[in-house]
Image (tube, coloured by chain):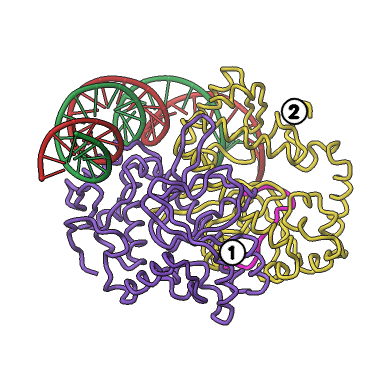
Chain colours: A purple, B yellow, C green, D red
Amino acid sequence: MIPRTIESPAPLETRHPAAHPQLRLVRDITQARQTTSLIPSSQCANCMMHWACIASAVPSAQREQLDHMVHTWRKIARGEALFRAGDTFHALYAIRSGSFKTVVSHPNGANHVTGFQLAGETLGLDGIAADRHTCDAIALEDSTVCSMPFHCIEDLCQDIRPLQHRLHQLMAEEIVRESGLMLLLAGLSAEARVATFLLNLSTRMQDRGYSALSFTLRMTREEIGSYLGMQLETVSRALSRFQREGWIIVSGKNIELTDMAALTEL
Amino acid sequence: MIPRTIESPAPLETRHPAAHPQLRLVRDITQARQTTSLIPSSQCANCMMHWACIASAVPSAQREQLDHMVHTWRKIARGEALFRAGDTFHALYAIRSGSFKTVVSHPNGANHVTGFQLAGETLGLDGIAADRHTCDAIALEDSTVCSMPFHCIEDLCQDIRPLQHRLHQLMAEEIVRESGLMLLLAGLSAEARVATFLLNLSTRMQDRGYSALSFTLRMTREEIGSYLGMQLETVSRALSRFQREGWIIVSGKNIELTDMAALTEL
DNA sequence: CGGCAGATTGACCATAGTCAATGGCAGTGG
DNA sequence: CCACTGCCATTGACTATGGTCAATCTGCCG
């Protein structure tokens, strides 16, 4: 993957088509499906996010059951909520395209971003605990999600052992992710937190076939600050400092990493 | 539950026997079992922590399967590890008596307490993600745990739908707990964090039949500080301040809450 | 009784929060 | 198409919270 400067921020889906040759094709097909409401038998199999999605644990023999379960797609416009804290819990959501933030609110009015989710990642696990969501999930850009009713997932887990195991892994990964984040919040300086955040985003972009060195932040400085437990000004200052040191190039929401090693050892 | 001062800190198990009339009895029976290595058929049913344990989701008809699964108890001495980061993941553990801390280590050497677990709570969920534990679980006092091999749990989940659901809830609760903790770490002042910590411990002690207003901290100031993302001195100062204000009475590891309302609104 | 880990308290300092002013960009409407 | 408007970001000056270092104290355990 070659670093490149970004003239005009292209939408996520079209950034590095070369990495996924079949990507544009799939996208065109799915577009057609949506407008015609046609639901072919193996929609999941063709999803470009299949590799990351929970559904990948279902062997091809049981594809039909899977497609039966994944019965709706939803489009969520930028700024809209997929679900809100307090909503009754129905389904898990796999992000098909776009990105989200999850926000929890403190009784006193303060609220805090607990995570950013990219395409292929799963939303809604928090709702399982008490049959009620505990956070808001807000789209950071126009996005689409597959919704998988949880009782259907649990049914399917009874038949498909690998799916059961995958679901458990998924939830456990979320637990591990959060304890890593706590380590971050509790132990590191503000600058180290920002650096870690950039590196984390970088690897996740790479996993999705985008450049690890040049990407667009879909969230504001304030959201980053909330996520990392600091003020937006501190985020801004950290980025400015990194640029002064020659470790990154910042241009608004576009970030280019020019010295990952320096960021790592902060 | 009546507040009372503590002359000599009694072990957790014998603090409020009145709350659980059958408690001492159960303890004596379990003691006998351990020394004689006798494993009666329905050990789980008689466990005093049954109400909190994952095993409570197994209907009585399937008790036998359950008891077959829960095949070992382990004693862990204070300061010893139940498992360590990097250990291959075999089992989930239900704490039968005692308490633990979980600690994650940062490559740079710093480490961070991610949680404190009391009797009835579950340890080891982090290992599911990658078949390898990601944190150390260290006993804060001499403790006993039931070990439940995870493949057995997954087998049993295929037969027992309620157990499957309970397991999912348990994991989701952990996710929610951690995002609450992040809110705490990121959003609140040092004093507010300490206050929240005390209140949280208080309700968990109450759930277990102990006084909500008077309890013993099993962990050091340093461990509390690590958990809450601050220095041990800051914890100490916060407790001193609360005492000066007349909100709590501190005597080493013994805490008495005398004005919960004041702590709540910090 | 001595030694040591844990806890408390104080003095000083640095990091990051707060307040404020300014600059840039994108989306909207004339 | 351009100008306006509001949101987002940047930067500076000052402040306060909490970290650091150090001295002392307490209580527990051998």
- Chain letter for mark 1, please: A
Is B158 situated left or right of A67 in this image?
Answer: right
Q: Is residue B135 magenta?
A: no
Residue A91 visible here? yes
Residue A182 visible here? no
Figure check: B2 above or below B159: above
Q: Residue at x 56, y 24 (%)?
A: B265
Which residue in the rendered view is the most extreme toward the bottom?
A61
Which numbered dot is residue B7? 2
Tell me the quadrant of the picture where the N terminus of chain A can be found. bottom left
- Residue A3 position, x and y percent, is 20, 64
- Residue B248 position, x and y percent, is 63, 23
Q: Which residues are magenta?
A: B88-100
- Mark 2 closeness class: few <14, some 14–19, many ≥20 residues within 10 Å: few
Residue nearest the viewer, comparing A242 with A122: A122
User: Where does label 1 land, which residue?
Assistant: A168
User: Residue B39 appears in which quarter of the rendering?
Assistant: bottom right
Residue nearest the viewer, comparing B262 with A109: A109
Q: Residue at x 34, y 47 (%)?
A: A219
